[in-house]
Image (cartoon, rainbow, N blue to C red):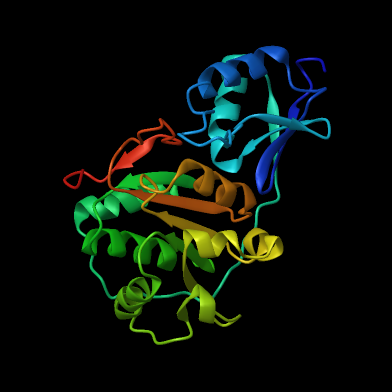
Amino acid sequence: MADHEPLEILVDTDVQVASSAIPRRVVETLRRQLRQLDASAGSDEPLALLTVREGRHRMPQALLPRLTEACRKQGVSFAVVDRRANVACPPLRSRLRPTEREREVLRRLLLRDSGVVVVEPGPQRTLLAAELCARRQQRTLIVTEGESEGYCRELRDAFGLESPLVAPLRSASAESRIVVGRYRGVLALAASALREGFGLVIFDGVDRVDAVTLMNIVRGVGARYLLGLAGAASRADGLEGEPVLLATGYA
């Protein structure tokens, strides 16, 4: 491919580029960046963040900024073809009142498709999740290591809603605007539901879930918007993802 021809980057459940089209120098830049991340994190199953299958280089969609930045640094023009899911739902109105710091974090989140906020479990984490659900106006899946019923109660209180509009995964219906499930339960969802059923996915406790489980879900998600909620700015395995948005005063 001549450098003046834009590199087509397809974004769906993952990021894909034709192996025959992507310049070698871009691939080498990505491999250097991902060498530390592309590890098993204590498991026998490698994460393989950058793979080649069916003639295409592939990586999780949250790594799109790494690819576009590598292209910019190497002087390679590109065009993004975005096929991620937008699943609009009637707007929700949160009854919680964010502080000025929290409004700034939300403002920064709304400028990007994905990000990680460092905030301890508790009222602030619930507030940020609820506010982002309200502002994105997308059918939302919240994935957590904790107890889903408790999370649902907190969100119902935040919005002044009852079931089934906010529901645990096992009892969710087409009417549910926010669905809360544990990581293992979400792994068992049908591929089509994970790919097409939600426009926003929030990963709660993203610093604590094992890397293989996390990446298996991320690779199946077709949602346009992703958010990680973490109690720490880094993981023991080095898999922090994209730049962390620190909620000033929390971390």
Asked if residue 173 is positioned above or below residue 128 in the image, the reply reads below
Considering the image in quadrants, where does the C terminus appear? Answer: top left
From the top left corner, tell me how far across and down residue 70 is, in percent.
Answer: 58, 21
Q: Quadrant of residue 11?
A: top right
Judge from the rendering whether residue 168 lies leftward or rightward of residue 59; answer left or right: left
From the top left corner, tell me how far across and down residue 21 is, in percent.
Answer: 80, 23
Residue at 40% across / 30% down in the picture? 238
Residue at 21% across / 50% down in the picture? 101
User: Is residue 113 among the parts visible in the rendering?
Assistant: no
Task: Work out whether residue 107 or residue 201 is closer to the camera in this orientation and state it.
Answer: 201
Residue at 28% across / 59% down in the picture? 125
Judge from the rendering whether residue 1 lies leftward or rightward of residue 93; answer left or right: right
Judge from the rendering whether residue 183 lies leftward or rightward of residue 161; answer left or right: right
Residue that extends furthest to the front in the rendered view of this protein:
44
User: Is residue 96 among the parts visible in the rendering?
Assistant: yes
From the top left corner, tell me how far across and down residue 147 is, in percent.
Answer: 36, 69
Considering the image in quadrants, where does the N terminus appear? Answer: top right
Asked if residue 219 is positioned above or below residue 67 in the image, the reply reads below
